[in-house]
Amino acid sequence: MINQKIFEERIKTADSIILELINERKILTKLSEMEKVRFTQFYQKQANLSLLAADLLYTISTEKAAKDFHKLNPDYECFLWVVNPSYYSMFYAVHALLAYKGVRLLSSQGIHKITAHALIYFCLKNNFIAKELYELFVQSQQEAAELLNLDEFKEKAKDLAANYFYEVEKRSRFTYETGEEAKQNHAKTSLQRSKEFLHEIEKIIEKV
């Protein structure tokens, strides 16, 4: 759980960044009713498609019948790739929630960080969503950054060589040194967290 001091610092940071982006017209805050419905439904669909992809990849990795159907080797697994669509399901769910509130993010640069800041600014600090939902999203985002190389969440390496060897070491550690059971547990946690998050978001926007 995020302690109160860190939480307050994140609110201050989100306030500063989001207000600046609003002033630069990189965030729209007054979508029309038609736009609200259109973008909410669009992002909700993408969230569900991403979750379905994650579920299918997990099923293929764990069930013999699925492996046989796709003519895969019995030891085939793609647990690492369950994390990717699991995170993006939550990412799109946040954008659906923002659209529901009349907000659309236009800036593509640093979009993952901006999404987290927008979730705080528009939905969390006014208690529109529970703090626990924000923490679920942050957990997923941090794991995706580590495992899937989302560059904007890493401090830039001092040089390309340092960055290269960091990536090789990191991926080697997860891919080769982590046992299959640990990878499966990680994928299962990511998938379950994504399901819980999307379910809660859809309860909020179910009338759209």
Image (cartoon, helix red, strand yellow):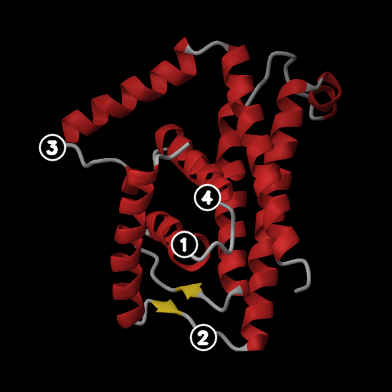
Residue flagged by tag 4: what amino acid is it? Tyr
Q: Is residue 136 left or right of residue 33?
A: left
Asked whether the beta carbons under mark 1 and mark 4 sit within 8 Å of each other, the answer is no
Query: Relative to the observer, which residue lies in front, 176 or 118?
Result: 118
Q: Nearer the viewer, mark 3 or mark 1?
A: 1
Q: Which mark is residue 125?
A: 1
Determine which residue is flagged by label 3.
Answer: 158
Residue flagged by tag 3: what amino acid is it? Lys
Give the alpha-carbon distance from disc 3 to disc 2, as whole Å. Answer: 41 Å
Q: Nearer the viewer, mark 1 or mark 4?
A: 1
Q: Earlier in the sequence, mark 2 or mark 4?
A: 2
Q: Which mark is residue 134?
A: 4
Report the quarter where the C terminus lies.
Answer: bottom right
For image coordinates 63% across by 80% down, the residue present is: 36
Residue flagged by tag 2: what amino acid is it? Lys
Asked whether the beta carbons under mark 1 and mark 2 sit within 8 Å of each other, the answer is no
Determine which residue is flagged by label 2.
Answer: 30
Q: Is residue 182 left or right of residue 106?
A: right
Give the alpha-carbon distance from disc 2 to disc 4, as whole Å. Answer: 23 Å
Q: Secondary structure at mark 4?
A: helix
For image coordinates 58% across by 49% down, the residue present is: 133
Asked whether the beta carbons under mark 4 and mark 3 sit within 8 Å of each other, the answer is no
Q: Secondary structure at mark 1?
A: loop
Image quadrant of residue 44?
Answer: bottom right
